[in-house]
């Protein structure tokens, strides 16, 4: 298994998990682009946006529930935040992930 995020999911590589369920993990980005920069990652190895299937609909709604929980936890509701999914050459890890960026953004991801 040479997928970085699958190795984090399998606890073979360390990450400070801020959320974990049967289907999703979330942890801080190692190179943050904002005061709050969390990666929300489904445990299912889906490569990217274009590989999503209709059957992943429930998983996507769970991902946005986690986003909302973290927005509340990090007091971003009345601050600025955005959710980013990179694709194509903008995506560096080939396991779909959702960047939650909040507070002062340092740069665009
Ligand atoms: P992408 O460019 O694929 O949308 O985002 C990948 C993100 O993963 C980057 O923001 C990068 O900083 C982050 N990242 C890469 N390797 C690691 C790692 O080993 N641990 C953590 N926590 N984040 C990582
Ligand atoms: Zn993977």
Image (cartoon, grey):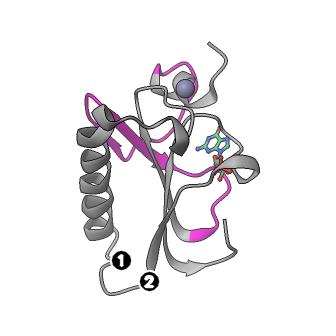
Badge 1: few (under 14), some or many (20 or more) residues near its Cα, within 10 Å? some
* Residue, far top: 1
Q: Position of residue 100 (x, y in %)?
A: 46, 62
In-front residue for pair 72/87? 87
Q: Write down the residue under mark 1.
A: 76
In this rendering, the answer to whether 14 lies above or below 27 is above
Q: Main secondary structure of the magenta part?
A: loop
Q: Which residue is mark 2?
A: 80
Residue depicted at 46% across the width and 26% down the height: 9
Residue 84: x and y in percent read 53, 62
Q: Name the residue at 30% across, 56% down.
A: 64
Q: Are marks 2 and 1 in contact (CB under 8 Å)?
A: yes
Which residue corresponds to the image point at 41% horizontal and 45% vertical from the top-left? 26
Mark 2–mark 1 distance (CA, rounded to whole Å): 6 Å
- The quadrant the N terminus occupies is top right
Which mark is on residue 47? Answer: none
Residue, x 46% and y 72% (percent of image)? 82
Q: Which image quarter: residue 35?
A: bottom right
């Amino acid at each position: 298994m040479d997928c970085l995020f699958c190795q984090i999911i399998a606890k073979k590589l360390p990450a400070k998990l801020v959320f974990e369920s049967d289907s999703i993990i979330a942890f801080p980005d190692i190179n943050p682009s904002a005061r709050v920069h969390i990666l929300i990652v489904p445990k299912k190895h889906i490569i990217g946006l274009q590989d999503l299937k209709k059957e992943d609909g429930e998983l996507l709604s769970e991902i946005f529930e986690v986003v909302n929980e973290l927005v509340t936890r990090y007091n971003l509701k009345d601050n600025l935040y955005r959710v980013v999914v990179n694709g194509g050459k903008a995506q560096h890890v080939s396991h779909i992930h959702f960047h939650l960026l909040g507070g002062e953004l340092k740069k665009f991801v």
